[in-house]
Image (cartoon, rainbow, N blue to C red):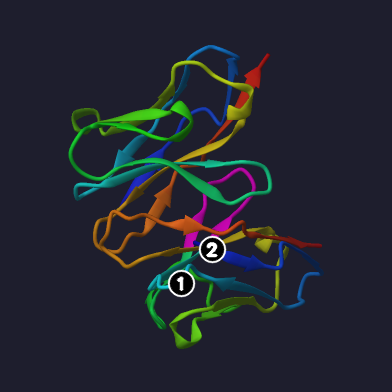
Amino acid sequence: AQSVTQLGSHVSVSEGALVLLRCNYSSSVPPYLFWYVQYPNQGLQLLLKYTTGATLVKGINGFEAEFKKSETSFHLTKPSAHMSDAAEYFCAVSDRKNNRLAFGKGNQVVVIP
Amino acid sequence: EAGVAQSPRYKIIEKRQSVAFWCNPISGHATLYWYQQILGQGPKLLIQFQNNGVVDDSQLPKDRFSAERLKGVDSTLKIQPAKLEDSAVYLCASSLYMGTDYGYTFGSGTRLTVV
């Protein structure tokens, strides 16, 4: 079964500073990996995904993530935080057969002016 | 294209009452999922449908939860009777079909409060 570990439930970052959210996964098969963002009282919005090919994937709103198989990681970064990035971020892993997503516990990002 | 529609957005009920949630997926999406998101946690899969058949309901508390997807389109999730620990956001999602890298589209969810 797939699983995801996200450490640090709350992450504070200064406006303009680097955003780094860590995600490590466990999967018995080559995974599909996703990052979702959730704004208050809204559903989950896909930021980016890795399926095959290039291991550095770029998503919306200036975010990117790199798949590192040797480290079983899929960390999310953004070079410069903006106030609008304040939200909850979830890393998820999916098996390739059934598309079932297993989510991490999430990171609540707070952007400090 | 229209997104995944869910209703109601909010529901407050007393424990031991029953409640139902409705989901209308994106047109043409064969696969539908219900997730439960408890405050402070990531979403957890409750049930997965492929057209109108159940693919996985291993994490659905079947003594109180039920779900159906009639005609392979809309779906309803029911809780009867509700417990305090059922307070959560219930998210519906759909995808074109299984085994694809297409990914999901989530609805905005139904926030349930059991008092």
Identified at 68% across, 48% down, the residue is A41
Name the amino acid, label 1: Ser
* A30 to A72, vertically: above or below: below
Q: Which residues are magenta?
A: B35-45
Question: Measured from the top left, where is residue B92 in percent x and y?
Answer: 53, 64
Chain ID for label 2?
A: B
Q: Which residue is mark 2?
A: B2
Local SS, label 1: loop
Name the amino acid, label 2: Ala
Question: Measured from the top left, where is residue A15 in percent x and y?
Answer: 60, 14
In the orientation shown, which residue stands out farthest toward the front?
B1
Q: Give the quadrant of the N terminus of chain A.
A: bottom left
Q: Which residue is mark 1?
A: B27
Q: What numbered label is drawn on residue B103?
A: none
State left or right for residue B45 relative to residue B13.
Answer: left
In the orientation shown, which residue stands out farthest toward the bottom?
B71
State left or right for residue B98 relative to residue B110.
Answer: left
Identified at 54% across, 64% down, the residue is B4
Question: Measured from the top left, where is residue A48 in percent x and y?
Answer: 39, 39
B37 in magenta: yes
B114 in magenta: no
Label 1 and label 2: CA atoms lie apart by 8 Å
Mark with earlier residue (1, 2)? 2
Quarter of the image where one finds residue A52: top left
Local SS, label 2: loop
Q: Give the quadrant of the C terminus of chain A.
A: top right
Identified at 62% across, 74% down, the residue is B22
* A38 to B30, vertically: above or below: above
Same chain for labels 1 and 2? Say yes or no.
yes
* B56 to A38, vertically: above or below: below
Contact (Cβ within 8 Å) of mark 1 with mark 2: yes
State left or right for residue A57 relative to residue B87.
Answer: left
